[in-house]
Image (cartoon, grey):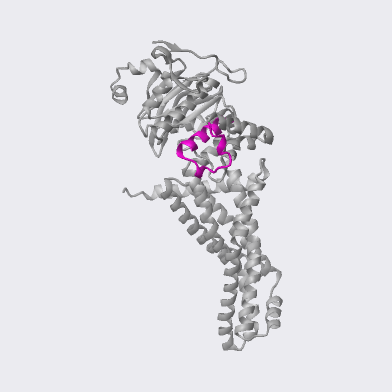
């Protein structure tokens, strides 16, 4: 197999970024142009949002629980187990809720989008759609993009709530802490910038999941092997981007709001 | 040898005399490799042009260029009198309303029923429900699959899927049909059924078409047979005659090496053609 030159690799990288930017730009703008496929948006919202509820609930609950367990054991050294609720709610709402929910949804839906659209590419269904007078970006990409952004926002709120509840269950029933104190500290510590930070992240992460999944799906080449490759790349790239962008957003928010 | 003639083709508008498709010195390549080079061809109203060529010679690419699914590197492509090289995708969608395309493996939408697959274009055009039902039934009756309305593509055989793809392509009563290897990978009996449908579309509706195939027996069946509406199947043209509206193109190594009638093709002295046809 011939080794590619650095120049050729760099060119491919630039072209990929350009293609990704064009695809996402058009997918966002399509919502303002007719025809709009609202029924497809509802179908995708059901598949992405409602379909992800079980994994988000389970992940959120156990994350909150383990967070309470670990925090309480560390805080006990300083005699500060009373602030377990504060630690759990801040961690869940600012970081773990958005990031873990996004990673779970990425694993489930970025792969789903890449494999579904990839299969349609290699079986010429996308070409058939264009030949039948439909813009595949409007019909397939735009509904997935908006559905993921909207549903991930609500899934994150669900995950935050269940996570805090999971922490409470562990704190009360396993660690013997006072329930009202747990919820009181969990609530009192929260300020608007924390909530804002926790709600901005899923919007950005939802955009990453859908755009990366659709980009790899729509650029699938090479039969079933290509579909497998696209699926793997979509999950890996979206997961890494979520974690990297999380750092950027956190730094930005701390810089702006001071917490 | 006699030649069977056709009544005038039924193209719409005032462009009934001009060619429906013109390729003028069209070239395209991928990753530095030329796939098609200086291709020039014309499809006149009512003509059936059969594009022959070995696998990998660029036949499917040529069909995608004709439908604007790919853009050429150079040359011009004119469809129904409009140059499509630089036509925006939105305008192409409208133009494609007059073109039906049958893809190599059918390319039916897995998640839709046969009815919804065939009705897809009509539903996108917001055609009233009653008319959609009537036209879908009509198209499926044409391919003799009215009983499969509520089935999914995965529940159909390969040949049935190809017939549904034909129904989907003709439901809008197109002025030009592009067939990409409609019999590829099918057994001989099913292939004959598909060839008969292509012939029926040609002889009953006189639709212009460009058909890609590498199966010589199918190509020559189209040239030497006609569809008998009374018997509802194809019959050989009397006295060994040939269909006057069916002509051949042969593609080899990205070039058109033959463009002419069935008679000229079988009597060609070109060494490649002789070997290819033998």
Q: How many marks?
A: 0
* In front of the other: A24 or B274: B274
- Compared across the picture, whether B36 is left or right of B122 comes to left
**In this picture, is B158 found above or below A25?**
above
Whether residue B147 appears in magenta in the rendering, the answer is: yes
**In this picture, is B270 found above or below B27?**
above
- Residues drawn in magenta: B144-171
**In this picture, is B48 found above or below A9?**
above
Any part of residue B260 in sight:
yes
Q: Residue at x 46, y 52 (%)?
A: A230
Whether residue A24 appears in magenta in the rendering, the answer is: no
Residue A26 drawn at (x, y percent): 60, 45
Quarter-wise, where is residue A187 in the image?
bottom right
Q: Residue at x 44, y 53 (%)?
A: A228
- Compared across the picture, whether B111 is left or right of A190 comes to left
* In front of the other: A190 or B214: B214
**In this picture, is A123 found above or below A208?**
above
Q: Main secondary structure of the magenta part?
A: helix
Q: Residue at x 65, y 61 (%)?
A: A153
Any part of residue B181 in sight:
no
Residue B213 drawn at (x, y percent): 41, 29
């Amino acid at each position: 197999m011939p080794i590619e030159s650095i120049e050729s690799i760099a060119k491919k990288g630039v072209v990929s970024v350009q293609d990704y930017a064009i695809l996402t730009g058009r997918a966002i703008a399509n919502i303002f142009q007719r025809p709009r496929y609202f029924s497809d948006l509802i179908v995708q919202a059901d598949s992405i949002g409602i379909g992800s509820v079980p994994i988000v609930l389970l992940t959120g609950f156990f994350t909150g629980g383990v967070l309470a367990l670990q925090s309480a054991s560390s805080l006990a050294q300083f005699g500060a187990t009373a602030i377990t609720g504060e630690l759990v709610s801040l961690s869940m709402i600012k970081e773990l809720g958005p990031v873990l929910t996004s990673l779970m949804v990425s694993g489930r839906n970025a792969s789903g989008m890449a494999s579904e659209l990839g299969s349609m590419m290699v079986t010429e269904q996308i070409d058939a759609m264009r030949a039948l007078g439909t813009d595949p970006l409007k019909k397939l990409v735009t509904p997935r993009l908006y559905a993921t952004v909207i549903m991930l926002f609500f899934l994150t709120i669900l995950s935050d709530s269940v996570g805090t509840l999971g922490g409470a269950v562990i704190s009360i029933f396993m660690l013997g802490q006072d329930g009202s104190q747990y919820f009181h500290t969990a609530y009192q510590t929260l300020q608007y910038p924390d909530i804002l930070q926790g709600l901005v992240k899923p919007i950005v992460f939802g955009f990453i999941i859908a755009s990366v999944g659709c980009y790899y799906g729509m650029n699938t080449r090479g039969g079933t092997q290509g579909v497998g490759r696209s699926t793997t790349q979509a999950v890996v790239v979206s997961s890494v981007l979520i974690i990297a962008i999380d750092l950027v957003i956190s730094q930005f928010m701390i810089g702006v709001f001071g917490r | 040898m006699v030649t069977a003639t056709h009544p005038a083709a039924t193209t719409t508008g005032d462009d009934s005399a001009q060619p429906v498709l013109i390729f003028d010195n069209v070239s395209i390549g991928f990753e530095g490799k030329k796939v098609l080079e200086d291709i020039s061809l014309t499809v006149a109203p009512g003509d059936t042009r059969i594009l022959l060529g070995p696998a990998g010679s660029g036949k499917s690419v040529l069909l995608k260029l004709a439908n604007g699914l790919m853009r050429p590197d150079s040359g011009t492509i004119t469809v129904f009198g409009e140059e499509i090289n630089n036509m925006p995708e939105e305008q192409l969608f409208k133009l494609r309303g007059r073109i039906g395309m049958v893809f190599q493996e059918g390319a039916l939408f897995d998640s839709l029923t046969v009815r919804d697959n065939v009705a897809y274009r009509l539903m996108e055009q917001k055609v009233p429900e009653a008319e959609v039902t009537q036209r879908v039934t009509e198209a499926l009756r044409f391919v003799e699959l009215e009983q499969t309305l509520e089935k999914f593509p995965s529940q159909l055989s390969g040949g049935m899927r190809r017939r549904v793809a034909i129904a989907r392509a003709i439901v809008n009563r197109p002025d030009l049909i592009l067939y990409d290897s409609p019999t590829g990978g099918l057994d001989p009996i099913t292939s004959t059924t598909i060839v008969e449908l292509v012939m029926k579309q040609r002889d009953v509706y006189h639709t212009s078409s460009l058909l890609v195939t590498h199966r010589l027996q199918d190509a020559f069946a189209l040239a030497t047979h006609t569809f008998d509406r009374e018997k509802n199947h194809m019959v050989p043209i009397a006295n060994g005659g040939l269909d006057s509206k069916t002509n051949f193109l042969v593609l080899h190594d990205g070039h058109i090496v033959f463009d002419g009638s069935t008679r000229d093709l079988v009597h060609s002295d070109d060494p490649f053609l002789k070997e290819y046809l033998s």
